[in-house]
Image: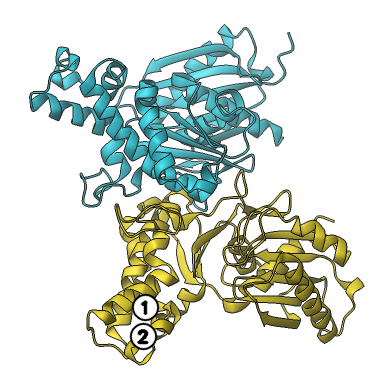
Chain colours: A yellow, B cyan
Amino acid sequence: MKVGRVVLAMDIGGTKLGAAVVTESGDVLGEMLRPTNPSWQPLEIIEVLFALAEEAVCRADTEWRALAALGVSFGGPVDFPAGITVRCHHLPGWEGVALRDVLAERSGLPAIMDNDANAACLGEVAFGAARGCRDVLYVTVSTGIGAGLVLDGRPYRGAGSMAGELGHTLVVPDGPSCSCGRRGCLEAVASGPAIARAGGEALEAGEDSVLRCIPRAELTAEHIAEAAGSDPLAARIMETAGEYLGLAIAGAVNLLNPQIVVIGGGVSLAGDALLRPLREAVRRYGAAEALCDLAIVVGQLGRRGGLLGAAALALERSSCE
Amino acid sequence: MKVGRVVLAMDIGGTKLGAAVVTESGDVLGEMLRPTNPSWQPLEIIEVLFALAEEAVCRADTEWRALAALGVSFGGPVDFPAGITVRCHHLPGWEGVALRDVLAERSGLPAIMDNDANAACLGEVAFGAARGCRDVLYVTVSTGIGAGLVLDGRPYRGAGSMAGELGHTLVVPDGPSCSCGRRGCLEAVASGPAIARAGGEALEAGEDSVLRCIPRAELTAEHIAEAAGSDPLAARIMETAGEYLGLAIAGAVNLLNPQIVVIGGGVSLAGDALLRPLREAVRRYGAAEALCDLAIVVGQLGRRGGLLGAAALALERSSCE
């Protein structure tokens, strides 16, 4: 078997940490995951990541010096050219950490770091639903909503590395409050927490649903997404979220005329219950010119999106060596 | 004086045709303009363009063989890689014309053609308000509303050359009818005709304004834009248009995090009467991360945007030789 380049991938998410050894065709030779402790500081997380990485390298039956580069998917905004984290959405202490260079020095590998949406977009282009595509809009629908872009075959990050803030596009004038302090953002009506809240409110209002079996405090968007295939209430909630997503995505499609839109993140597990209303809304609100030949699909990398995205970053990095 | 490369620029607009000889620093050595006859077919327009070009070359005191390339700004969508016009918004017969190759053959020059918004964006980057900028959103507000993009220092055109359809982004749910057949598009509430219509309706409703001096049938957005500095009604109409533009631009800024937004087209002549409400709306609806260090300015090329954009295209083309 020709393996080609092999890279190390690290994923720093709000709920889990991961490390993996990945080949340039996307095969995962060794992988280690563990839950994040929300009280951990950056230095503790770096220790855990290297322990996971050592074990992943061992399981991959390879050696550290065989690795071509290190890629890191980070769950929050980063200053890409500087390799510095801006903050983490779910973990403390990540303001202004020069993570890329710390990891590069400790690993002895050329390192590259990007936010999780950009990394997942690259991962879908390298190994998943957007393989071979040059103009790609990736939208992750999870605790937050963000976008990653590959344009003209290259990752696009914006002047301040802040491209992809699709979640804070207005979709409901004077709508529900958003975490950003404004009202009616896409994230306030179609993110995981917004979907869970809509479910809780419908149940409180007395609607019948299989979701009643789930203790209220534990009800998540994933539950609703999974139930949407058979439960009318869950289906209706996903339909509303899909329509709002489609409205915002239509604006992005008009502007960028991508060939494919890939939907990822936990909420995308709803599949057609989300995709059907989303696609309909994109066709309703998109300009005819920009819709021609447009595919809208669910991502293929699923929960491995972070690690495979990090691997795609590492492969990009090692191509520059 | 070191002139460097000299190129030929052609501009095919809805109301005028132009040709110019331009240096690589943006100096116009010879320029010819004339109104378009709306009944002319493509072959007649090509004849006129070459007559204008011959005269421009003559006025520039240069020779045809000194020209490095030919750039064409076309007032409608084009299939960029193929060099074929898709249609013209204001002139008949332009469906599927292989204009780039026709002009290349006849001129003997390497030729490049793009739509007017993309060309004007490149022009502002090469010679105007966005000089030296790598991530640029250009928005033209005229008979229609369209956008041009330069991302990571390169023109971005989209998978089917249809990027930039900002005018058909929904901004008013169930709002006024748009030329595209849908309702509430940005173009239906903030383009030149929409602004002129708002003015006409306000005058019909009896509002006091200097615009009463203009025969109703002749009232244009340019009149309203020019009056907005001193006339309250004109100012209010530009304010509404600026707010809608700002709302749509905020979505684009969130997605792309450009360093500069350049507003061009006839309506941009309103200056601050348009820019102030537009900037305020971008700040109100844009994500904080994407707004950091963002400049929003009026274009510097004005009515020469088409020709200087075509020249910028030609310079891009001749760099590839």
Q: Is residue B202 left or right of residue B182?
A: left
Vertical position of residue A18 compared to residue A140: above or below? below
Residue A50: x percent and y percent? Answer: 80, 74
Local crowd size for mark 2, using a 10 Å CA cut-off: few (<14), some (14–19), many (≥20)? some
Circle 2 residue = A229
On the rendered structure, is A292 left or right of A280?
right
Inspect this view and state whether residue A230 appears: no
Pick the residue in front: A144 or A249: A144
Q: Which numbered disc, 2 or 1, marks the residue that appears first in the sequence?
A: 2
Say yes or no: labels 2 and 1 on the same chain. Answer: yes
Q: Residues within 10 Å of mark 1 (few under 14, many from 20)?
A: many
Q: So how many labels did they put on this image?
A: 2
User: Where does the image place residue A122, in percent across and percent down from the top left?
Assistant: 64, 63
User: Which residue shows up at 38% across the image and 44% down it?
Assistant: B248
Quadrant position of residue B164: top left
Residue toward you, A165 or B47: A165
Residue A176 or residue A79, whichever sits in front: A176
The amino acid type of the residue labelled 2 equals: Gly
Which residue was labeled with disc 1?
A273
Residue depicted at 69% across the width and 81% down the height:
A33
Query: Could you say which quadrant of the image residue B316 lies in?
Result: top right
Which quadrant does the N terminus of chain B fall into? top right
Q: Nearer the viewer, residue B244 or A82?
A: A82
* Residue A132: % across, % down: 62, 65
- Label 1 amino acid? Ala
The local secondary structure at tag 1 comes to: helix
Residue contact at pointers 2 and 1, CB within 8 angstroms: yes
Look at the picture and state if B11 lies above or below A17: above
Residue A255 lies, in percent from the top left, at: 45, 48
Q: Secondary structure at mark 2?
A: loop
